Amino acid sequence: MENKFMAGYFVVCLFLCANKTQEKTAEYAAKKNFMDTNSETTCPFSTTDVKGNIVISYINEKNDSVAVMCYNISQDKGHSFGDTIEIPSSKRVHPSAENPPKIVFKPNGEIIAVWGINNSNPKKKYGGLVFYAQSFDDGRTWSEAKPLVPDTASIDQRYFDVSILQNGEAGIIWLDSRTQTDKQGSTLYYAETNGKNGFQNEKPIGETTCQCCRTDLFVDGKGNIHAVYRDIIDDSIRDMVHTVSVDGGKTFLPSKRISEDNWAINGCPHTGPTMAANKNGLHFAWFTAGGEAGVYYCNSADNGKQFSPRQLLNTDARHPQMTALPDGTIGIVWEETVKKNSAFYSKIVLKLIKPDGQQTKQDVTADDINASYPVIISNDEKVLFIAWVQQPDNSQNNSTESKHQQAKGKQVFYRTIMLE
């Protein structure tokens, strides 16, 4: 079913500008910049390379029928980026804001790019497949596209997440059409790389998962491997659950609801969970309409055995993403509906939760633009990097940047926030 919360294909928007929170918690640099790819871009994802540099990946939509996965690396904490690197074997990538391509950097120097494509199968009208490519020379050359799942019985693989494991390999989870039950839903699968041989030894780790919500794979400081996803409970309830492997991915504990929202919906919400960890434990954020609709937050101090009561962060928010700074501060971004001059827009908002529980909130974008699907990452105790997707400005703005964006349609901007 179509995502009623999705605003369509927008642009990855990243920009650097000056501002400060009312609580004086963040200082914004006073420079704006954008990356010019000569075509439209969308589907942001952010990570760090083996040197700790911030990396932004996205889809470059060259025309209506040609798109390719690209990435750029910053060597100055996200203030500027180097040359755009294309992954040639990704030219069948399908732009999907809820299922963006992703890239990871293994400690041995290998880079792995993962993306989704459409799968025109009569048994699955909106199905997809996951492919990946490897580079062993710092991104100069890439392997041909490889299927994540060789088994032809799998006709739908989507909503994947990938992360570097404690042993230096890459782990991946995804939703798969192969099931061992007659109940509705997909199966959550897990696999990990084996040296240069790519992803191996796939196995199911969850059943009856919601078919159209992104997943989150997270590795904590002790090497525990966490997976968070939306489950279908009692055939109608679609709530978030958590599972963890404490033995390096050999086994996963039975999943447990992070909050009993009891959201009964006959359809896919198209908005997944996010998690992070600090010295106080695990932290989660997600959207639900079980009870009062909005983005909620909870935490767990015992590795997922118990969860705190949920806390409503905002009733107008969607698509949260989370990171933890080295000092333990949790940063959460989301898109938030706002009304201005009798029109409705979607802006990006940042929430900071200090280890002592103190919270502050700051607008990242203005009230009169449409921005969505934010991502957030930190590689420094004082730096937050935020990217998002934004529509062109259709107002009568005569600035050089506004004219450029309207001419190009979607384009890439960034914002780096320096915390005090």
Image (cartoon, helix red, strand yellow):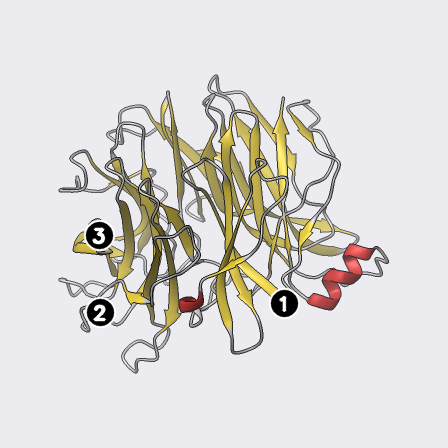
The x and y percentages for residue 189 are: 22, 55
The answer to whether 136 is drawn above or below residue 80 in the figure is below
Three-letter code for the amino acid on which mark 2 is drawn: Ser
The answer to whether 16 is drawn above or below residue 205 in the figure is above
As rendered, which of 313 and 96 lies closer to the eye? Answer: 96
Secondary structure under badge 3? strand
**Mark 3 or mark 1, earlier in chain:** 1
Please tell me which residue is depicted at 49% across the width and 44% down the height of the picture: 320
Give the number of callouts. 3
As rendered, which of 236 and 307 lies closer to the eye? Answer: 307
Residue linked to disc 1: 39
The answer to whether 118 is drawn above or below residue 83 in the figure is below
Residue linked to disc 2: 154
The x and y percentages for residue 173 are: 28, 52
Is residue 92 found left or right of 239 in the rendered image?
right
Three-letter code for the amino acid on which mark 3 is drawn: Ala
Q: Is residue 310 visible?
A: no
Residue linked to disc 3: 191
Look at the image and tell me in which quarter the N terminus lies: bottom left
- CA–CA distance between discs 2 and 3? 15 Å
- CA–CA distance between discs 2 and 1? 34 Å
Three-letter code for the amino acid on which mark 1 is drawn: Ser
Contact check, label 2 and label 1, Cβ < 8 Å: no
**Mark 2 or mark 1, earlier in chain:** 1
Is residue 5 found left or right of 248 in the rendered image?
right
The x and y percentages for residue 202 are: 18, 55
Secondary structure under badge 1? loop
Please tell me which residue is depicted at 58% across the width and 62% down the height of the picture: 41
